[in-house]
Image (tube, coloured by chain):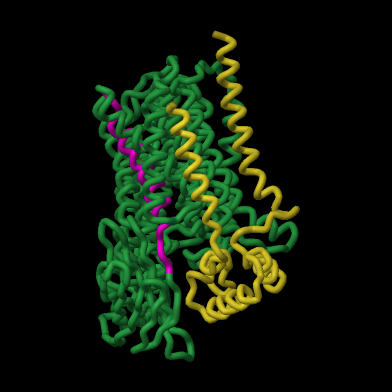
Amino acid sequence: MLSNIGNFLLFLNILLSCLAIYFSVSCLKTTNDLVLKKIYQTSLLQCTTILISFFTLVAAFIISDFSVINVYENSHSQKPLFYKISGTWGNHEGSLLLWVIILTVFSYLFLILNKNHPKNYRLYTLVIQNLLILGFLIFILFNSNPFSFVSPLPNEGLGLNPILQDPALAIHPPLLYVGFVGSSIYFSAAMASMITNYSDKLFAKSIKTWVLISWSFQTLGILVGSIWAYYELGWGGFWFWDPVENASLLPWFAMTALLHSLLVLEKRNALYFWTIILCLLTFILSVTGTFLVRSGILNSVHTFANDPTRGIYILMYLSLMILASVYILFTRYKPASIEINSNSKETFVLVNNWFMMFYLITVLLGTLYPIFTDAMTNNKISVGPPFYNSVIIPVVVLFLFFMAIGPNVKWIKNKFINFKIYLLIFLAAVLLNFIIFSFFKSYSVISNLIVISSLFLIFSSIFDIFKKSSYNFPRVISHLSFGFLILFIGLNHNFSIEKDFNLKVGETKQIDNFKFYLKDLKLTQDTNYKTITGQLKVNDLFTKEERILKPEIRIYDNPKTLTYEASIQSNFLRDYYLSMSNIDRSEYYNIKFQKKPLMIWIWISVATLSLGGFLSLIRHAKYN
Amino acid sequence: MKIRILYFIFFLNITISVSSNEALNESQIHKNLRCLVCQGQSIADSNSEFAQTLKMVVKDLIKQGKTEDEIYSFLSDKYGDWILYKPKFNYENFFLWSFPYIVLVFGGLIVFFLIKKQQKKT
């Protein structure tokens, strides 16, 4: 039953989408500046039906209707209700439905919230957005249909991968999708803007809201994803430069560049085509990321169940998108005279974009390079964290200095910035860095530089707050947070303590100043899994601290899987992190222990970084 | 005067940094080796038997007095370059290592000339 409703609603959505395109195209020819009422209605109806079809799927998950293929493959009647619901978007098909919802809802909101912009610009945006929607609907219906009927009716579902049964991972996909699927709306708007020659400051104003929304959500999505990786993957790292993580980072770089170049377009009416390119690039990278993740051509920790036909479809979709956007870009391109003075804000926005492009290309190259070498020379190589760290980190140092100075320069023209103040700030940063490093006795050139440059950014941002009578609060918050983020990552990386060893019950082991004792193991039965909980006493012989950590090994029944739950004790100064895993045919357990300073502050910095985006959104709404 | 303080502090930082030439860091090596039977994990992160064995091999190689690079080339001869997370700097990977910097330099030149051109006009 639910399977039929779902299929019907998907078909209906295809029809409505075609209808919206048809109405919009016919409305383009009318001379008055009014968008026909039926276009609003169609668009609203699209939103309603796609939401209903999504809730149909949610309902199927809640009542465990295993005649629906998606429920059968990803759920189980014994699963807690919360994870039944989150299971809806925790898989390929269901998440595609979430994609289409965001495409559709953003399309409608853009239409109704931009009433003071020209009719044709809005209509073209709607048409292009609907073409994107159609592409995805067809993909869902003919290749990845969550509503396909299973016959005969199975008694029980296959269950959801236990590591996905987690609160952070329940909210991670929606956040991330609002981010990178949300970028579709300014892809469409950029195309429409080129077609209708709507290229002034007002265009920048019309998309700014959407850029801010997608950027803020993307940032949050990445944050939640790395928190999840930190406690669930069980290795104590939070960023692995894994292809799937890179796929979420690439659009983020493009968005960040766009966010800044948009300022120049808005304030100075310059850099129009560059801004357009960034708009197009952001969504293209989002789809590229989806392609890489879903087609399974990359080896990653976060694997989706994959299937080559999906890859081919998304690749076709992607190529069409790129061809269309490149074609329109070339036919509409006019070389514009750019008025940029050195030492003006425009220059620094360009500098920001320059660095963002560097990060973007480095990460893109690193992600794709193994595919090329494999195809060309049959030699499989890995590009992992050491590559990214050694290429990117030295450049970040330079970037942070520019980032500190940039915002204090005026638009158009400026006398040379107050050199003395920066020298003082620099001195303070170097001094504090020296104190930190001599206190903790751990040194490396690059960590010193990272700490100095991030302190430089932090001090100068704080200085802004006290010195200037009027400053852009959201900007200060985001820049300050970014400075803190790099600082905390630098300190955390440099002063983390890691121990990796094997231990059996009743055994004591001392490594450097830490003493470990595995007291005992307890077996308990939970609703849908068994747990082995270890009791580990950790003594720090320097600080005389003693704590008990309780790592778990969980044995899930449906599907049969082992997961390792780390025991984490965190406070504002440091995290104690301990995970335990069994070793085959041995009574020993492998223990990974880490003491990670300032861990929680890394999360807080990213959260406030994204908060800056939301505040800027409010500010933008207030003044426009 | 300020400049002199600056030099002093900077010099202090550098000397401290250089003086700390640590011995071979085992876990650093583990992080650079891919666990071949896992999905995108290094042997430092993995619990698999393969990772356990490889850790012992690394320990052995360090005992034999091999340098970090020698350990890497020993393992990549045996398992292929797939095992190294830090790609070798060789002919094949030249593009990978150099292209980011080419982008960095060119991007800088573009920004520089855009501004330069503008200043001539005004």
Identity of the residue furthest to the top in this view: B122
Image colour for chain A is green
Determine whether, in the image, residue A584 is placed left or right of residue A514.
Answer: right
Dominant SS of magenta comes to helix
Quarter location, residue B58: bottom right
Decide if residue A18 is in sight here.
Answer: yes
Q: Nearer the viewer, residue A146 or A618?
A: A618
Tell me which segment is drawn in magenta: A470-498
Q: Position of residue A344 (x, y in %)?
A: 45, 20
| Residue A299 found in image quarter | bottom right
- A161 over A134 or under it: above or below: below
Hue used for the chain lettered B: yellow
Image position of A439 (left or right of B3): left
Q: Is residue A339 magenta?
A: no
Check if residue A481 falls in the magenta segment.
yes
Which image quarter is the C terminus of chain B in? top right
User: Which residue shows up at 55% across the image and 56% down it?
Assistant: A292
Viewer-proximal residue among A95 and A414: A414
Q: Quadrant of the N terminus of chain B?
A: top left
Is residue A39 visible in the rendered image? The answer is no
A417 or B52: nearer the viewer: A417
Provide residue A305's location: percent of width, then percent of height. Answer: 49, 68
How many numbered marks does the figure carry?
A: 0
Camera-nearest residue between A100 and A172: A172
Residue at 51% of width from left, 19% of height from top?
Answer: A342
Quarter of the figure with residue B106: top right
Residue A229's spot in the image, x, y percent? 40, 63
Name the residue rendered at 38%, 30% in the picture: A424
Q: Residue placed at 42% from the left, 56% from the top?
A: A441
| Residue A183 pos. (x, y %) | 43, 41
